[in-house]
Image (spheres, grey):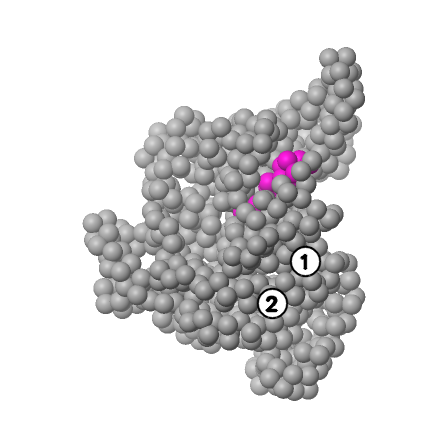
Amino acid sequence: MRVMESADLTTDTLASYDFVLKALRQIDKDSQAGALAWAAVETVSARFDPVDTLRVAGPFLLAVGDNEDLRTQVAQLYRQAYSDREGLESLMSESGIEGGRPVRRALRTLEVCLALDRGAFLSARDEDDAARVDEIDISTWDFTITTTSGQEVVGAVHLADRYEPADTTDFAVMRQFNREQFAHQLQKDPAAVVIGFCRDRGNRITSDELASLLAGEFADQGDWRKWWTRARTSLKRNRQVQLEGRSPYVVSYLDKPVAPEDSFLAEFATLRDPIAQWSLMEKYVQQCKVHKSVPPPEVIRQCWNSFQKRAKTASAENTALSGMLWLIVARTGELGEVDGAADEATAFLKAATDLDAVAAALESDALMDIFCRCLVEARPDDWQERLLELLPVLPTAACERAASQLLDAGTDPSDLDAAVARIMASPIAHFDALLWLWGGPSDDTLARTPEPTKILTRILRALDDARRSDELAKDTIKRMNAHARSTLSANKHDRFVHCLEGLEAGLASTLRNQLSRTDALGRALREDLLRILNNKFPPSAAAPKVAPWAREDVLFVTEAGLTKKQAEIDHHVNVKMRENAKAIGRAAAHGDLSENAEYKFALEERDLLRARLAQMNAEVEMATVITPEDVPTDQIGIGTRAVFRNVESGKELELAFVGPWEADAEKGFLNYKAPLPQKLMGLKVGEVAEFDLAGATGEHEIVRLSNTLEE
């Protein structure tokens, strides 16, 4: 709490200390985190007004999670800060800030809605779209908005889920509501357009993404190339812009221009968070490269001394933070030409008991590269096994390096299969590694790379699931979307074109439906992919339309059913297959494998587990989630609940027709794929069917139909 005593304390500075609360929760000290956050907010409220105090209270509440006392404290601050806002209590209730709704969603609802008035503009969170607020009904907090699809009414919570406030200069707003101004800006200041798009996407965008947004809509391909050349030339002169790569270029916008050495060190000294310090140092080093200069080693060594002190005083209980700090020490030491720069990081990894936590915290390829090198030195006997386990959580670029490192050391390519299975089974948790699989590991990296179509459908489903999640941070979802767009649009979509080779017409139809429903890719990229798909498989040439329940290429399920199946796959991969791998290792250690019955049994079990995993993955690939809007009530279909009346006895029987993963015959939930439900599909009220089920025998008349998903 000493930071609270500083005379120079600002709420923005204090809010950055939410990492301390997160660290406490990581070591299961939730109550201490909650108490510390509550006390800090109380202290801040005595020095700052309610609006400024909320800048601290919001991040702290997100950091500690669902803490009732802190929820109440934050709600009271909102009442004080917006006491003159008409309809505030109604909005507070709708947001669920005092309970009943996830913290992140509740805060997001209040933050967005309180910032809006009639005539305000909004930008979509997950696609290149914008909206205008036409009316606000403060009695219900329903918003009437105009979008590209026309006018619609949406509630406060769903509005905040989909949009965030935007200025009139936002490029999505200009493109939709003031195209003349946008076209003028394109020609007058192309660099400003690029920077605008870049800042709208977390300060990073690729030239391929820009082309998908602009080429065709505002310029043909020839004009686009000339325009991009002009923009690139201008961007290179801007010290707040960083250009990397080539085909595609990666454009990054820095919040502050790179300063000379003395300014850099002065800013470095003002930061208290070592991660923020390291991020600043990396930006400084990169900008030196852009301007073809070399950072003086003595400047970097000053940073190295600071990081080393922080690493030595870090809590040993927080493995992730300590590991990151020692890897930062190693990275900075190498940049500063310090002898033995990685020795202490190697010693830490040698003693660490939770390498997963260290690897999962590393979002930098540079730190991950050092991590892999130090791991070899720290664990000479089992580093290959550990790296295999860690492969699914590595960044995209690091996956290939790690796999190559394993193969160079003699690892059998088939041993990577288990890591690939984990990636495919949990696509959101292993999204970067999934994009590595899509990009195509080198030919000799994997024994069996999954089919591109399977990887693509996993990517699309992960993006949709992430968008619906209340647990993922907004920045995480944005990063996933941006990374997916960049990967799928790379090299003029050549990987997607290759994916369509040999694709069956039925699977093409399924892929078309999935792409059409995916908003996370953005409108331009989605339309590009659909155009390529339709050119290869024209919709008119598709197979004759059949009833949904008769389709063999699709498995219709509810979202709950899909979640249940994915949990089963996670258990299969992370528990059963891992236990089997350990059993193989124990049996192999006994020697003389030709006479080792335990070893042979373990190998047979491995083959069965792999076959079962392949079957479950194939089922998930076929799965399409149905919504209440998809369920028919004019006839029996998937998701319909039907009440039958026995013609002779008058006894009623209620049956629901659902996917195979939700079926429970004892409770009246039947798998629509089973023979009897298939016989009943399409029947309407008043029609009679004969069947024998659960003691109900004879002819039965359909008397009522309803929607199972709405009950």
Quadrant in the rendering for residue 34: bottom right
What residue is pinned by disc 1? 322
Residue 352 coordinates in the image, percent (x, y): 72, 49
- Foreground mark, 2 or 1, reads 2
- Measure how far apart labels 2 and 1 are at the Cα level: 14 Å
Q: Which residues are magenta?
A: 382-395
Residue 269 vertical placement versus 284 (above, below): below
The question of residue 427 being in magenta is answered with no
Residue 346 vertical placement versus 605 (above, below): below
Quadrant in the rendering for residue 380: top right
Q: Is residue 569 left or right of residue 623?
A: right
Decide which of 549, 570 is in the foreground and name it. 570
Q: Secondary structure at mark 1?
A: helix
Which residue is at a point 44% across and 63% down the rendered structure image? 295
Which residue is at a point 56% across and 75% down the rendered structure image? 270
Residue 346 in view here: yes
Which residue is at a point 71% across and 82% down the rendered structure image? 43
Which residue is at a point 55% across and 67% down the rendered structure image? 302
Farthest front residue? 339
Amino acid carrying label 1: it is Ser
Decide which of 378, 198 is in the foreground and name it. 378
* Residue 306 circle label: 2
* Residue 118 circle label: none
Q: Is residue 376 left or right of residue 179?
A: right
Amino acid carrying label 2: it is Ser
